[in-house]
Image (tube, helix red, strand yellow):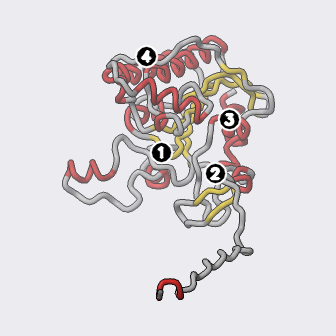
Amino acid sequence: MIVDKIKKREQPTAKKNVNKVDIPVGKWVKCDKCKEILYKETLKNNYSICPNCGAYFRMHIDKRIETILDANTYKRFDLDIDTTNPLQLEDYPKKLKSLREKTGLKEAVACGTGKINGEEVVICIMDSGFLMGSMGIVVGEKITYAIEKAIELKLPLIIFCVSGGARMQEGIISLMQMAKTTSALSKLNKAGGLYISVLTDPTYGGVTASFASIADIVLAEPGAMIGFTGPRVIEQTIGQSLPEGFQTAEFLLEHGFIDKIVERKDLKQVLYKLIQYHK
């Protein structure tokens, strides 16, 4: 039969790709600005700044503590409070649990005391990796507690801000944190305490409209986006095009909203000098 005469062809063996490079997962990151692929360790050693174009990456709380405070001086305030679910949203507790496992953080802010070149301060550091640094009940309570401790201990207060605004999952209760933190800062001001806020990318919404922008001295990192709501919403509301660079730290410095733009590598020394001047 003709079928018997057909020879079976052997399947060619797949050629081994000897030039394939084994890149470890999680060791590299892409810069959104210049599109370069960067080794994470190199980025970490460069203050989380792209060595090619100078773009600022967002910093984890632990890294911020490491770059701003003297080694082994940070003492976290031990507040036994947990996030509630006032709107009874089914997915909210699951989201919080997932974020805690992923980021190693309990909430979007860490508060405590530490030293900057030997000068003791009360410090709060927000983290965009936890629900975009949104301000809910716990964030508002922690910051208020830190303000009250700054009054009690007669120490300067420093808050590193990064946030998308009030936490919508907690409804109107999240908006109440604006009034609570602002009221506490009013007491700090009357007591003669120093409050410095550092605005990082991005700082928006209820955080900008409350404690972030009413400091004695308002600093910002280069290129940080700062405002109440996004440019697109504003343009749609007023029906006009916005100026170039609107809501960048540089634009806001030019228009008097912030006092100084400070590069990340210089922040510790600048904060130290401001504390010295106040003393």
Q: Position of residue 241 (x, y in %)?
A: 26, 60
- The kind of secondary structure element at disc 3 is helix
Task: Please tell me which residue lies in front, 273 or 180.
Answer: 180
Mark 1–mark 4 Cα distance, whole angstroms, equals: 25 Å
Left or right for 4, reference 17: left
Look at label 2 and name its amino acid.
Glu
Image quadrant holding the C terminus, namely top right
Q: Position of residue 80 (x, y in %)?
A: 58, 11
Q: Position of residue 259 (x, y in %)?
A: 53, 44
Left or right for 179, reference 159: left
- Cβ–Cβ under 8 Å for marks 1 and 3: no
Q: Which mark is residue 62?
A: 3
Look at label 4 and name its amino acid.
Thr
Identify the residue at horizontal 73%, vertical 33% (top origin): 69
Which residue is tagged 4?
84
Mark 4 or 3, closer to the camera:
4
Give the total of numbered labels: 4
Left or right for 251, reference 36: left
- The kind of secondary structure element at disc 2 is loop
Which residue is tagged 2?
263
Look at label 1 and name its amino acid.
Pro
Identify the residue at horizontal 57%, vertical 81% (top origin): 8
Mark 4 or 2, closer to the camera:
4
